[in-house]
Image: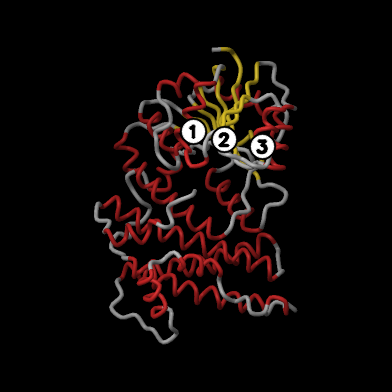
Amino acid sequence: MKKGISIVIPTYNGGRIFMECLKKIKEQKYSGEIQLIVIDSGSDDGTPDLAEDAGAIVRRIDKRKFNHAKTRNAALAWVNCDNVVFTVQDAIPCNVTWLSDLEHSINQYSVVAVYTDQIPHDDATLYARFENRGIRNFRGQERVLQSLDSLESFQEMPYHDAYKAIALDNVCAIYRKNSLMNFPFPEVDFAEDMAWSFAQLLKGQKILYQPSITVRHSHNRTPYYGFRRQIINSYWCAKIMNRVAQDFSSLSPTDLMFLTSTVRKIGVSLKTDLLKMGDNSALNGQQSLRVIEKIVERYSFINRARWFLIDQPSNIRKHVSSEYEMIKEQTCQNIVHTLELIKTDAKVEIADKLMEALEHIIANLLGRMYGEVYASSIIRGNASQTLSSFMRHYMQGI
C-alpha cells in the first residue's frame, strides 16, 4: 500500500452538489497521494463523467445491486492507499485541510477510524436544520475517544449512552485500510458503520469523534422518506445493538393505526392554528396531512378499511392498554413540543414553512414509533406475521 488517502464515494445522480464536492476535494492542501474512487449506481445525469473528469476511478453497478455495506466493501479492491475516507456525494469539506486533518487525527490517536461533525447546507430547510442541530447536540462539540470495556458493560449502559458509545458515520470517516481488509463492513442493509464500530470496539479497538473537522451535509428529504428512514433506523439499530430504547412489543398494527389517526387529528388542528397566523388565503384547504395519506396508502385493503372506521370523529377506542396510552401521549406531546422548538429557534412566523416542517415532524415521530414497535417485537422474538406484513411496505428503498 502507498502512503496517502483513498477517497470512496458512492453516487447516484449527484448533480450540482457533487460537482461542489469534487471541487473541494481538488482544492485540498494535502502533500500525500490522493486516490478518488466513485461507485455509481446507474446515474443518468452525467455524474460518472464528472467523476472521470476529476480523475476518479469509476465503477458502475446496477442500482438494484447497491448495498450500503457490500458496495463499500467491494470498493476496497481498488484502494491502493493505507488510509481510506468514506464519504457521500453531498458532503462538502469545509476547508482545504480536511484530508490532512483526518490523517493527523487517525495517526495521533492510534484509532481504527475517525468521524467528523456536520453542518447544514445553505439551502437546508427548517426541518433539515433542526435535524442537523439535534444530531450535533447529541454528539456534542468535544472530541470523544470511544472504547468499550466489555459486552457486559455495554449492555448495562442506558440506551442512549450505548448508542452514542458505538457511533460512527460514513457521511465522512477515515479508516485504516488494514482494519477494513481484516474485518470488512458487516453485511447489514443499513447502519454498516455502526455495526463495524461495535465489532471493533468489542475487540478492544478505539474510534475517535473529531468535531473540529467538519463537512457540510444535510438533506431536504420528503416527509414520507423520513417516515420510512426512521423505521429502518429503529429496526437495524435494534438488530445491531440487540436492544431498543423502549419496549413496545405488546402493541399491534391496530394500535399503530389508532396512533396514526390520533396524530392526524393533532396535525390538522396544528395546521389550522398555523393558518391563523396571517393572511394565508393561498393555503386554505391544505389542512390535510399528505404524509398521513402516503402512510395509509401502503396499508393493505382490509387495513385501509379499518383505518377509515378508526379515523371517524365519533370513534372512541375502548380497553386500551397502558402501553398504548403512553406511546400516544408521548408522540402527541413530542409533536407539539418540536414544532414550538422550531418556531422559537428559527424565529420563523411564516405559516407555509412551518406547515412544511410540521409534516416532517409528524412523519419522523410516527416513523420512530412504528419502528420501535416492530424492532421491540423482533428483539423479543414475538413479531407476528401480521405485524411483519404490515411493516414490509415501508422497509424498502432507503
From mark 2 to mark 1, how far is it between C-alphas? 8 Å
Q: Secondary structure at mark 3?
A: helix
Tell me the amino acid under the disc marked 1. Thr
- Look at 66% across and 77% down and name the residue there: 275
Secondary structure beneath disc 2?
strand
Task: Please name the residue shown 70% across and 77% down the image.
Answer: 277
Rendered view: 247 above or below 274: above
Whether residue 62 is visible, yes or no, is yes
- Amino acid on which disc 3 is placed: Thr
Q: Is any part of residue 116 visible from this angle?
A: no
**Marks 3,1: beta carbons within 8 A:** no
Q: Earlier in the sequence, mark 3 or mark 1?
A: 3
Specify the amino acid type for callout 2: Pro
Q: Is disc 2 in contact with disc 1, using a CB cutoff of under 8 Å?
A: yes
Write down the residue under mark 3. 47
* Residue 71 - label: 1
